Image (spheres, rainbow, N blue to C red):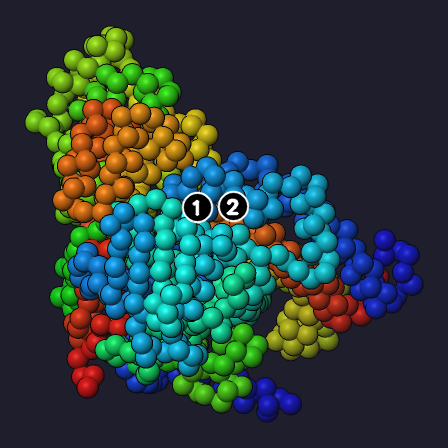
Amino acid sequence: MAARAKPGSLINYIIVRLLLTVPMLFILLTLVFILLRVAPGDPAAAMLGAHASIEVIEQMREQMGLNRPLYVQYFAFLGDVLTGDLGKSFRFGIPVWDLIKHRLTATIELVLFAFTVAALIGLAVGVFAASRRGTVWDVSGDFYGILTYAFPIFWLGIMCQMLFAVELGWLPTSGRFSGFIDPPVMRTGLYVVDSLLEGRLDKLVVALRHLIMPGAVLGLYISGIFARMVRTNMLQTLKSDYVLAARARGVRERWVLLRHGLKNALVPVVTVLGLQFALLLGGAVLTETTFSWPGVGSFLVDRLLERDYPAVQGIVTVFALGVILVSILIDIVNALIDPRIRY
Amino acid sequence: MRKACRLLAVGLVLALAGAFLPACAGPAEGKILVVGTTDSVTTLDPADAYDYLSSNILNNVAETLVAYEPGTTNLAPCLATEWDISEDGLTYVFKIREGVKFHDGTELDAEAVKFSLDRARTLGGDPGFLLSDIDTIEVTGDYEVTIKLKAPCSPFLSKLAYTVGCIVSPAAYKADEKLETDVVATGPFKFVEWVEGDHLTMVRFDEYWGDPALPDKVVVKFYANSAALKLAVEKGEVDVAYRTFSPLEEEGLKGNPDLVCLDGPSPAIRYLVLNVTKPPFDNIHVRRAIALAIDRNAIDEQVFQGTVTPLYSMVPDGMWSHKPVFKHEPEPDIEGALAELAEAGYTPDNPLSFQLWYTPTHYGDTEDDLAQVLKAQFEATGAMQVELMSSEWGRYTDDLVAGSMGILLLGWYPDYFDPDDYLYPFLSTEGAKSLGSFYSSAAMDALLKDEVALSDQEDRTPILEAVQDLLAEDIPYIPLFQKPQFVAFQKDVKGVILDPLQIFRYYLIGKEGWE
């Protein structure tokens, strides 16, 4: 596809990538639509529970539009998405976007923090291990990678809760903000940023105190993969001729590692970082449940169990768009890191 | 540039370090009550609210014509000061309280009452059926409303006391449109904000006609699971934790000297449903054998650590007309069960095999254990073999209505507090179709019809008892237990009432030091 674009033009490439998101989204939305309806369970009965008579359930199905033929429902759904309307949640009766916008920003705040933690730790451990190849430090780095990935994330979460919140009392046990103080005025939806914009340091501290533990746990979980990626790529880069030449010229080792080694090892790492973003969203489900973080991940699971079609379709659409945009962003960053990359 | 980066890094480190200092969180602003729960709110429109927490929020920000006195099951005047019921039980004339203001400043009058009830009847919301007995609503004075019923309905006032009967401001609502995210009514609190999954806030309504609410502000915080809620109340992050903990968590909280824990009666019941049209449960001897093999006390001890109350009728213990018709000695009666099984042609050599269905999460973490214990009890007869089957709630409700499950676990929380709500939906031919038993009995239908036409409690009691006797004779359902309410709160919190109807009244709760 990229071949049709003018060679060397990043902007053309981005345009093509953006255009490609349309068929990608179309396929994804179609799949979600079909899978939800293939799964057993009637949304009307699930919502009304054991209280409702068959007549009431039928009435509810009518109201939900579930009595219409499937193809009518499908085209109505696609038409709504095209006009930016994600529909109304069956369970809540309010527009899906209104329902998830706060949760979405909560998940974004959590994932951004986790991403930063993961990148910082992953890079540090990876570079350190690669620069001391074969030593006990290298093995420790390797061990760290396996350990963080092998630990169930909810277990890690509960252990941190017990230590930092229950035993030491340093951090709140769960949630996104204290009930005793008004949350910051919603501007970006990111409490840390909104607290700063409001100029309230006390709220910033409260927001950070709530964010640290879930963010760090989620970050730690992913950091091991980063560390291993960075280490492997660094080792390969450090074997290359130009690194040898740099060392032969007497360039300082730190400079060799960071300037020549890390910078060139970063291209594949950044690509994987982008892919991990989607994984982070998945990991967020478990972290959100453990820490009662009011994000979109745990919400998606609940809506799936209730067969809330519009809510599930809406969340998947927004998730998919997010992942696609991040992968485009990664391409741009890669091109900036390595001037040789042209599309 | 490098200097700026360093400054930024130092700032970030300081902010993170500061975040670890609990003292930096700052004091609470005003008389704030924070209530934690694992329930969620789904709508704030009285015409549509049909789940526990949505209704409970409405019970604190909105009001009905008649309401239950706190801590009792007695109906008392609320937005109606008095009412007359015609001899034939068809006409209700309500005098509306004067001088009551809605949260938007408009005045309550008879027109507002008619508007609200008509709106709830016609909008087609989930609880709308509770007002289906109404034929017409007429404004017969500035502060008088006359409601005519299609047929006499003894629990009509109880139905009006459900939140579907809340009176809302006509200036803030449209007659033909739901308002799911706001509520403008007359209650002691004014709704402020609802961030789904995070919190809901309400503040005291200073122009409230009754006694003012004790807190300036109530924040209801939503928790994703009971473990997180337990930690939050233990660490003082919430003042009150209400609904819902596991038995083990309740036990842990009761052992915490820094907290106060209360148990209280609950109208919620659990039971087994037997599909009387599906073999082998179409055989009364099989149904009797199953009923005799159950040991409710063992369920209480083994699954719920002694926190539930065995139940021997579908009408909960403590409610008028309750008759423990399933009580038998000994319990379990293994010999009796074997005799009934033999009547049906089953013996230890030719055991009765069936699937017992349950849904693993909808009723909490204990459901797997409950199903296991029931299986063990049935198999202890030596002439029953049970296969446990489970499906998640979406599928379960589907199969329930389709009648594909023979015996299954289910629960019930009443819409209105009257024995009728524990019997009619289950035992009437119409109701039983949607509750999985598909039970139909002309004798039962006749009894239920007679009962609902009477308005006097004393007249109704013998008929309701006869209904329960027939229930125990035909066994389309087997009551198992009532799960009491449980609440844990900080020692400085005062005024927590565990209402038998589970109406949790935030406006009566205060804290030491609040003047």
Residue B133 horizontal/vertical position (percent)? 38, 48
Asked if badges 2 and 1 are on one and the same chain, I answer yes
Q: In the shown orientation, is residue A120 left or right of residue B204?
A: right
In this figure, what is the number of numbered marks? 2
Which tag, 2 or 1, sits closer to the chain's start?
Answer: 1
Q: What secondary structure is found at the residue carrying circle 2? A: helix
Q: Residue under mark 1: which chain is it in?
A: A
Residue B27 sits above or below residue B317 on the image = below
Q: Are marks 2 and 1 in contact (CB under 8 Å)?
A: yes
Q: In the shown orientation, is residue B239 left or right of residue B355?
A: left
Q: Which is nearer the eye, B39 or B470?
A: B470
Q: Which residue is mark 1?
A: A48
In which image quadrant can residue A74 be found? top right
Q: Residue at 52% x, 43% y: name it.
A: A59
Residue B377 sits above or below residue B17 on the image = above
Q: Quadrant of the C terminus of chain A?
A: bottom right
Q: In the shown orientation, is residue A315 left or right of residue A217?
A: right
Q: What secondary structure is found at the residue carrying circle 1? A: helix
Q: Residue at 68% x, 74% y: name it.
A: A259
Q: Residue under mark 2: which chain is it in?
A: A
Q: Which is nearer the eye, B142 or B165?
A: B142
Residue A267 horizontal/vertical position (percent)? 70, 64
Residue B53 horizontal/vertical position (percent)? 35, 59
Q: Residue at 19% x, 41% y: name it.
A: B460
Q: Residue at 16% x, 13% y: name it.
A: B339
Kind of residue at badge 1 = Leu
Kind of residue at badge 2 = Met
Marks 2 and 1, how far apart at CA: 9 Å
Label number found at residue A60: 2
Callout in the foreground (2, 1): 2
Circle 1 residues within 10 Å: few <14, some 14–19, many ≥20: some
Residue B221 sits above or below residue A59 on the image = below
